[in-house]
Image (spheres, rainbow, N blue to C red):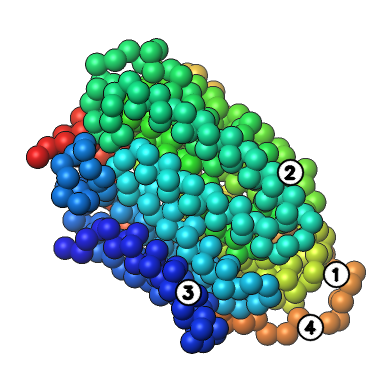
Amino acid sequence: MVNPVLLIVIPLGLTFAIPLCGFISKRMVKYIPILGMIFNLVIAIALIPQVMKAPIIIKLGGFPVPFGINLMVDTLAAFLVALISLVGLMISIYATHYIKKGATQNYHMLYLLLLVGASGIVLTGDIFNLFVFFEILCISSYALVAYNGDKPGIEAATKYLIQGTVGSGLILIGIALLYGRFGTLNMAHIAQQIHSTTLLSMFVPLAFLLTGFGVEAAILPLNAWLPDAHSSAPSSISAILSGIAIKTGVYAIIRVIFILFGAHSLLHFILFLGLLTLLVGELAAFRQNNIKRMLAYSSTGQIGLIIFAVGLASTMGIEGALFQITAHALAKALLFLAVGYMIYRSGSMEIDSLAGMGKKMPVVSIAATIGVFSLIGFPPFVGFASKFIIVKATLAQNDLLLTILLGFVLLATVIECAYFLRVIQILYFKNSSQHSKQSLGGTSPAVLIPICIFVVFIVGLGIYPEVLSKILNSAARMLLDRGAYIRSVLSP
């Protein structure tokens, strides 16, 4: 068995190897993140069959839990590391062509650190190290949003920094309150002791943690940083923020609710919060004329749908949420890469500037269309499978209130369909007022390869959703079995 610690150590080591490689060959630097993500992807996929049978607990330094630091690799953690690595790998390939100006060495270092932080978040079993890995991810993100060095980028990064710092402070206060009460930082050990404590007495640390993680998850009303960050950052970073970074906030919220606190009494609040985030996000996206801001608000809406599914607190509901995390990560990363390349060639983020791109850049436009159709939930794409599971899970509750709420979810999908089909109409059926006769030339393989691979996954998992269903069902069952989590970690 490969030690899961390597999923953090190898990419971290490669991060610090980048300056050394820069002395040998500056051209080599841009390929190092690709190497790190290939390693993590292979290892994570190899771990999934093992952890579906039983979680793997790694006790660092040989210290027993709860005295030492431990990694907890269950089905959910292994799957998310695989997803992080896949999306990270595709964006790394894209960046070899897209990132040519500025301090490229610093870009690739920060990018790898961001992915190290994301992987560490899903692997750690220690709440303080969860905070540490969040800080690694967030600090890298702040710098990468400002990478272009222009005024909008610096302003967006500053806004993100301020709101993120407040969120981090709330997380740290919540952790301090838990440590002061229970004298431990191990999540399983805290969960074991909270089990005999009333939830009301834990309300303050729970509120601090959920609010802090909610900032990174971009849940309403904590999403003010997201539109500016997405629209000002390089498109490769917009893709990783939407595809991966905000999902880590959702992951932390899921762990806090179901494992740390077992806070099932909050589920109705989570349902309504998710629905509100979904509706407001989709309505805001509908009003945008800037394509990257539209995609940013769309991400807020999709996160709302994931939170809504989490609030169902059933095996099928959690499976639907995890399916939606996967579908959104693939489709939104694809869209930011495809649209980012169109912006790169046209020089404008306005939706109208995409007019005629369907003829000028047919492969990229078709890929973007597939990403859009998946996000809306059209068959035979993976987004249809995820939304179908969420609808099925909601109806399976046989609850009138949930059925009414589901109607609003479907309304949000109609809104989403309206603004995305406007983009499709402009891509294919509106003539460009500028450069109408000018060819944009060939598309780099570094752009086409990741875009086409994303398309293969979106279509393949849409046609054969059972490939994911078994894994995600196992992850959902483990997540809802709080007692089994505690026993797995604390057993000698």
Label 4 – label 3 distance at C-alpha: 37 Å
Q: Quadrant of the N terminus?
A: bottom left
Q: Is residue 437 left or right of residue 410?
A: right
Q: Secondary structure at mark 2?
A: helix
Give above or below for 467 relative to 186. below
Where is residue 79 shown, x and y percent of the image?
Answer: 33, 54
Residue at screen point 29% across, 42% down: 125
Q: Earlier in the sequence, mark 3 or mark 2?
A: 3
Q: Quadrant of the C terminus?
A: top left
Label 1 – label 2 distance at C-alpha: 22 Å
Q: Earlier in the sequence, mark 4 or mark 2?
A: 2
Q: Which residue is mark 2?
A: 286
Residue at screen point 61% across, 52% down: 142
For the residues carrying marks 3 and 1, which lies nearer the camera in this image?
A: 3
Q: Residues within 10 Å of mark 1 (few under 14, many from 20)?
A: some
**In the foreground, 89 or 182:** 182
Q: Amino acid at mark 4?
A: Ser
Where is residue 472 shown, x and y percent of the image?
Answer: 32, 47
Q: Earlier in the sequence, mark 4 or mark 1?
A: 1
Q: Which residue is mark 3?
A: 18
Q: Amino acid at mark 1?
A: Ser
Q: Which residue is mark 1?
A: 432
Q: Is residue 308 visible?
A: no
Label 3 – label 2 distance at C-alpha: 42 Å
Count how many numbered circles sit on residues in the image.
4
Give above or below for 39 relative to 349. below
Q: Residues within 10 Å of mark 3 (few under 14, many from 20)?
A: many
For the residues carrying marks 4 and 3, which lies nearer the camera in this image?
A: 3
Q: Which residue is mark 4?
A: 439
Q: Amino acid at mark 3?
A: Ile
